[in-house]
Amino acid sequence: MPARRLSVGSPLVLGALATVSLHILGLAILGTRPPGPAFSQVLQTVCALLAGLACLQAGSRSAAFARTFWRLTAAGFLLWTLAQALGTYHLYFAPGPAQTSGLGVILYFFSFTPMFGALLISPGAGDPDRRWLLGCNRGREHANMASIAHGRVGVSVQARRASRTG
């Protein structure tokens, strides 16, 4: 699969640059005076949404293991976006006393669950020479872990030779 990259003029890149610039400008000008904190919370929600969309786009350009990883990470960011939006609404815009809703707190808590799930997925069934996420094949990955665990580079070299011949 040919590597496709985001162009500098893509909407996600421009949106991220604009959001970070607005956030810095808002903090510098408004600081902690109202509406500064509400403005900051809204921009944090936009940042989380952009991160989730970027992960979805990376997943659409990836295959197998990497696609699953990016989709789980996107799910985590999108749950965080929803929690951030609910929390901001209840804290700054909802009528009544300012407080965090129970649903917002629960969504914050569970927004990390898909990301932890991404840590547990297996790089793959199938061909061990198939390249995944970082371009390392599974045999080399196990050999590198063994060499780090034993503190010897020789273990890695021997494991690579054995995987090529056998």
Image (cartoon, rainbow, N blue to C red):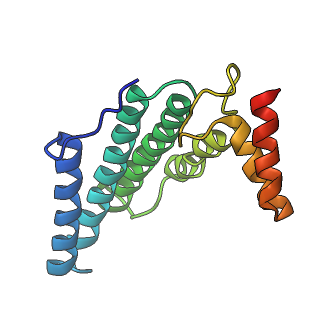
Is residue 40 rendered to the left or right of residue 157?
A: left
Residue farthest top in this picture: 126
Up-down relation of residue 34 to residue 83 (above or below): below
Which quarter of the figure is the C terminus placed in? top right
Q: Nearer the viewer, residue 114 or 134?
A: 134
Left or right relative to 124: residue 22: left
Residue 153 vertical position relative to residue 7 in the rendered view, above or below: below
Image position, residue 85 (x, y; %): 36, 49
In the image, what residue occupies the spot 51% across and 43% down? 76
Name the quadrant of the N terminus: top left
- Residue that appears at 50% across and 29% down: 67
Query: Dividing the picture into quarters, in which one does residue 19 lie?
Result: bottom left
Q: Residue at x 17, y 64 (%)?
A: 22
What residue is drawn where x is 19% and y is 41%? 7
Task: Place residue 93 in its image quadrant.
Answer: bottom left
Residue 146 in sight from this viewpoint: no
* In the image, farthest residue toward the right: 150
Name the spot of residue 91 as percent of width and height, x first: 37, 61
